Image: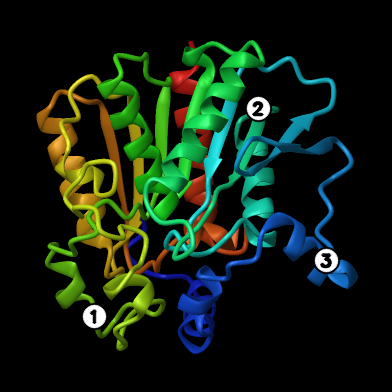
Amino acid sequence: MSEELSRKSKIIKSIVAEFNTSKYFADRRSIEEATKSEMDTAFSYPDHLESEIIKLDNCEIEKLTWKDSDRRQVILQLHGGGYVGAFKRHYKQMAGLYSEAGRGATVVSVDYRVAPENPFPAALEDALAAYDYILEEGWHHDEIIIAGDSAGGGLGMALCHTLKSRWRKPPAGIIAMSPWTDLTLSGSSYKDNYEIDPVFGNERSELIFNNPYPGDANRRDPRISPYFGDFTGFPPMLIQVGTDEMLYSDSEMVAAKAKSCGVKVRFSRYKGMFHVFQLAGTLMDESKKAWAEVRRFLDEVRY
């Protein structure tokens, strides 16, 4: 990846540093609440995409389909937000980007229950329910890609650990953007990048340091912190992370551990980038490269 940030990237990074991004990620509005509060600036998908809200037992999912597409691939999107932030507008934008990167792939986004009202294992149960919904709709496990950012990236790996523990077949692949894989915060980057991370740095955000999601459960449980699990038998993974993130170690450690278990892992470090920089879409060279990499990965794992 490029060693020098573009001028546009530097400007966006400085804006991120000024904006209270940790609270932005932790916005707890549901799909319904976000829709009501953003009526004047409601997000609209391009005309070639159709959206449908589907109610499951404990949560809602949004199913995004590409009109006239025959692509046999579905992306299960698990959003970030530190397990306290609900699905909202910028994750809809990411859903659209996933569909574009998948050349017409269907995207199922989960508005899973969040803490503190719904601690572990609520989010995991909802992710599993969405996975089962996809299978019940006629998709094969080899046609499913789990994709998540931040907490959603960790949740995707936790879902795979759960499937494995139940002797169930894994999906075709995992895309993890800046995944949170170790809620014990054992990685060195929590200290090394504390002063340079424009999203979580220079403050001990409760989103990271006192997160309510684990509740009374052991934070080393692989269903909470997937890093501590056995990755043997996992599908191919694409892990993307910015080098300036406090969560950098979460990606680095899990990539190394998965590789040691024989998993095919593409670990991409983006120099100078911040947490979930892919939200910038086509605004930065780095985010454009990241989405191009997602497209290549989706093509490669398609059976």
Q: Which of the marked residues, 3 or 1, is nearer the chain's N terminus?
A: 3
Q: Residue at x 50, y 58 (%)?
A: 114
The residue to which callout 2 is attached is 105
Residue 28 on image: x %, y %: 58, 67
Q: Residue at x 83, y 36 (%)?
A: 50
The residue mark sitting in front, 3 or 1, is 3
* Callout 1 amino acid: Tyr
Q: Nearer the viewer, residue 186 or 263?
A: 186
Q: Are marks 2 and 1 in contact (CB under 8 Å)?
A: no
Q: Residue at x 32, y 29 (%)?
A: 162
* Callout 2 amino acid: Ala
- Check residue 36 in the rendering and tell me which mark sits there, or answer none: 3
Q: CA distance from mark 2 to mark 3?
A: 28 Å
Q: CA distance from mark 2 to mark 1?
A: 38 Å
The residue to which callout 1 is attached is 194
170 up-or-down from 226: above or below: above
* Few, some or many residues within 10 Å of mark 3 (<14, 14–19, 20+): few
* Residue 293 seen anywhere in this rendered image of the structure: no
Q: Nearer the viewer, residue 151 or 290?
A: 151
Left or right: 259 in relation to 60: left
Q: Secondary structure at mark 3?
A: helix
Q: CA distance from mark 3 to mark 1?
A: 36 Å
